[in-house]
Image (cartoon, rainbow, N blue to C red):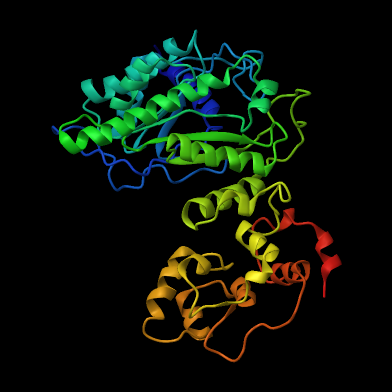
Amino acid sequence: MSFDRIQEKLAILADAAKYDVSCASSGSTRKNKDKGLGNSTGSGICHSYTEDGRCVSLLKILMTNHCIFDCAYCVTRKSNDIKRAAFKIQEVVDLTINFYRRNYIEGLFLSSGIFKNADFTMERLVQVAKKLRLEENFNGYIHLKSIPGASDELMREAGLYADRLSVNIEIPTVSGLKLLAPDKNFKDFIKPMEKVKNEIIQYQQEKKLIKSTPKYAPAGQSTQMIIGAAGESDKDIMYSATYYYKKYNMRRVYYSGYIPISSDTRLPSLDTEVPVLRENRLYQTDWLLRFYGFSVNELLNDTHQNLDLQIDPKLGWALRNLQEFPVDINKADKRMLARIPGIGMQSVHKIINARRFRKLNWEHLKAIGISMNRATYFITCDSREFYTKDLTADQLKYKILQNIKSKYQKHFSPQLSLFAS
């Protein structure tokens, strides 16, 4: 195979992979052994992204962009008139090793269109990882996509060589999947997730008894949803995410704003903007659910099915629950401190530690680093000065937005001026 052809394949299959954002690698602790090549410990692999969504520290490619399916939202759908290519197993192995030795990458993120069927494709992905581990003694990070419908035997083998496995759920709702990918079966997405979850649990139990138990997917499993392709609400998305976190022990759920790539009556038009602000708000909501103690129905429910894009979801919750405020910063428990807009979890811990020694005033809170432009309206402290003006939620929202600078400012509606006090 000529160098030019390899380069052409790389250009085609790396470009096709850029739509997959689920490639963060935190959590793996694979160490170098037997004087092998690389490791995946403590180096912060794959946390930098280019503007078009590609991760710059992994070799992020598809095995092929040939696909037997015709999913409306996918750039590699079989009806799309695009250049097609496919790597051989050894080509991916050679590229990974050569790029690693040149310090271009720290690991491999390998996904694929579906060649003939799920098992045929998954077997090729597993072969790449197996060759890297056993023949090249490669100890760097490997993230493999789990092909929906792949057999349990292949999923078992995949986890023995990969650090992370992931199945993209693609569309957050079953009805959306039926609309945009009628050839796919929702159960095929669930099957590999269930297998990986059970294998991880088994590995963790066996490791307690036998230290030499082979590692199984030490960085866990993740999934990704495409946002904005099927008309789903934020409530639909976050309830689905919560389900996958709880049911399948997901390490991460990723939210990828739909990029219009095809003209299809079932999809938003080609001139529709990528919903980057909505994507950002969903990640903030995800963070509140996992680290701030919120339950999903507090943030999204039948009354509030979509997030307010102009403000972060915690501020949105606070404005809907003004009866909970102001909070005395010197007396509130950890749960309530975490619910104050402008106060992150690091600041919560600093406040709890600092108030063991003195009552905190405004100067102390500024020194701790809380965002005063939001928190001021929701707290009291060791001071006679605190915010007392009785404003409605809309008036308070407008007042806060006047003092917030955001890179998403251009997306905000000018109708806010209607609420000016």
Residue name at image x 67 percent, y 48 percent: 301
Which one is nearer the viewer's eye here, 346 or 90?
A: 346
Q: Which residue reaches farthest right?
A: 418
Query: Quadrant where the C terminus lies?
Result: bottom right
Residue 329: x percent and y percent? 51, 78
Q: Is residue 286 left or right of residue 28?
A: right
Q: Which residue reaches farthest bottom?
A: 384
Residue name at image x 27 percent, y 42 percent: 29
Task: In the rendered view, tell whether residue 211 sits above or below residue 84.
Answer: below
Which one is nearer the viewer's eye here, 339 or 76?
A: 339
Residue 129: x percent and y percent? 32, 23
Residue 36: x percent and y percent? 18, 32
Evaluate whether residue 254 shows in this view: no
Task: In the rendered view, tell whether residue 312 sits above or below residue 72.
Answer: below
Evaluate whether residue 342 shows in this view: yes
Q: Which residue reaches farthest left?
A: 34
Q: Is residue 237 left or right of residue 265?
A: left
Residue name at image x 66 percent, y 43 percent: 235
Q: Quadrant of residue 87?
A: top left
Query: Quadrant where the N terminus lies?
Result: top left
Residue name at image x 67 percent, y 55 percent: 408
Which one is nearer the viewer's eye here, 53 or 323?
A: 323
| Tally of marks | 0
Residue 100: x percent and y percent? 31, 33
Task: In the rendered view, tell whether residue 382 sits above or below residue 217.
Answer: below
